[in-house]
Amino acid sequence: MTAARVPFAIAIVTAVLPLATAEVRPATLPQTEQNRFEEFYRSGRLAAGEAALVEWLRKSPDDENARFSLGMLQFLRSVEHLVQSLHHHGLRSDIPGAGMFLPIPRSPLPPNPNPKPPAYADIRKLTRRFVDDLARAEATLALVKSPDVKLPLKFGLIRLDLNGDGKATDEETLWRLYALFNRAVEAKDAENFLIAFDLADALWLRGYCHLLMAFGEIALAHDATELFQRAGHLVFTKIETPHSFLLDGKPVFEYGGVDIMDWIAFVHCSNFPLTEPAGMTRALRHLEAMIGQSRRMWTAIAAEVDDDHEWIPSPKQTGVIPNVTITAEMVAGWQDFLNEAEALLAGTKLIPFWRTSDDRGVNLRRVFTEARRFDLVLWIQGTGATPFLERGTLTKEETWQRFERIFRGEFIGFAIWFN
């Protein structure tokens, strides 16, 4: 169900598209070999662009700008494939009652008038494809090594064929998708929004690939059949379920057009048997790799001597996001966060247990390496955490309060951006 709840990658893409209507530096793409493949992005012909880049690299294997462009295209195609699959199966454009229970944005897709009702096996299949697509993009990006690599893109003008009809229309341009979730922007703002992606950004994108692969592996490690068959109709217009009355039957307890009992069933069925333990180990490795890429990214940023439409700037550079300044304290604070996150994943620090006031905590590493059935209600209650409780050094609340202070009360937002 994780991949079905929301096209998460689209949420990530739009979350990192801070187009603004003021104080955006006018942007003109340099007419150089570096952006010779940009038309594939702007026309939405991603498959053709990937084929052209593969052929180019066959003849010019040392062209790291082209290799970076290939990795970016492969990442965007992974997003495109996922959203096309969700649309094909009838993902709801506006999940009923989601705002009351889950932080799910409205889907950027129009309703599919003739969807293919998915079975749970279809959801697993599209999740596996998403993970495999991301792995391919990450492997390509891993070959980008040069500190001089540069990929200038007007990111908001990129088009994706989201509904899989073979055409990437004006409505499927990224800046228009961004406008669905945020304040209005115009085409001229997208035209002026240039990002000169560099080596640090290749590392940043590799980190995001690992993060999304971790989510996918966690989902695939568990069996969510019960959740899908009993509550999947909240997410898709039609599903294959033995409980067919859920699709057009009478509500039990309706409030605001939503059957509250369906959402209670959703929570009740968030109880997943572990069917593929190795997937949890792979997820852990991806999260550890994400931290490693973030460290390498900041090393690359610190080594930069230019100031060229920076996606994530150093304290000495000007970023493309208006009115946002990165300070030396933020950079140091982020390194402290990476250390803390790494210690939690390594099990050398513990998550404080919410049912006691002593030094017992949850060993997060063992949650992955000694994984078992996941029961949301029992985890909230506390007994789900019992197998992973131990005494040791706890991560401190003051540490996380300091991160909030350093990032001006917007630590989560900066974390989504920085990865």
Image (cartoon, rainbow, N blue to C red):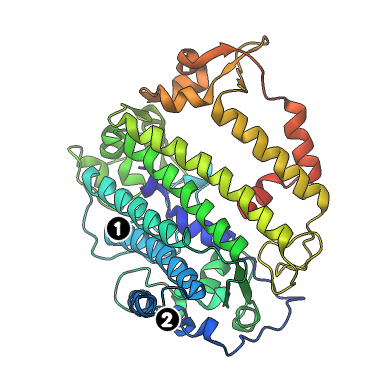
* Badge 2 element: helix
- Image quadrant assignment for residue 271: top left
Q: Position of residue 415 (x, y in %)?
A: 64, 48
Depth check, front residue: 313 or 111: 313
On residue 40, the disc is 2
Which residue bears the numbered disc 1? 90
**Mark 2 vs mark 1: which is more N-terminal?**
2
Residue in the picture at 66% in, 11% down: 359
Instruction: Tell which of 304 and 343 is nearer to you.
Output: 304
Return the x and y of residue 230 as percentages of the image width and height.
28, 36
Q: Callout 1, which amino acid?
A: Gly
Measuring 50% from the left and 49% from the top, which residue is drawn there? Answer: 104
Residue 385 vertical position relative to residue 220 in the rendered view, above or below: above
Residue 144 in view here:
yes
In-front residue for pair 123/414: 414
Label 1 Cα crowd, 10 Å radius (few <14 / some 14-19 / many 20+): many
As drawn, which residue projects farthest toward the bottom?
31
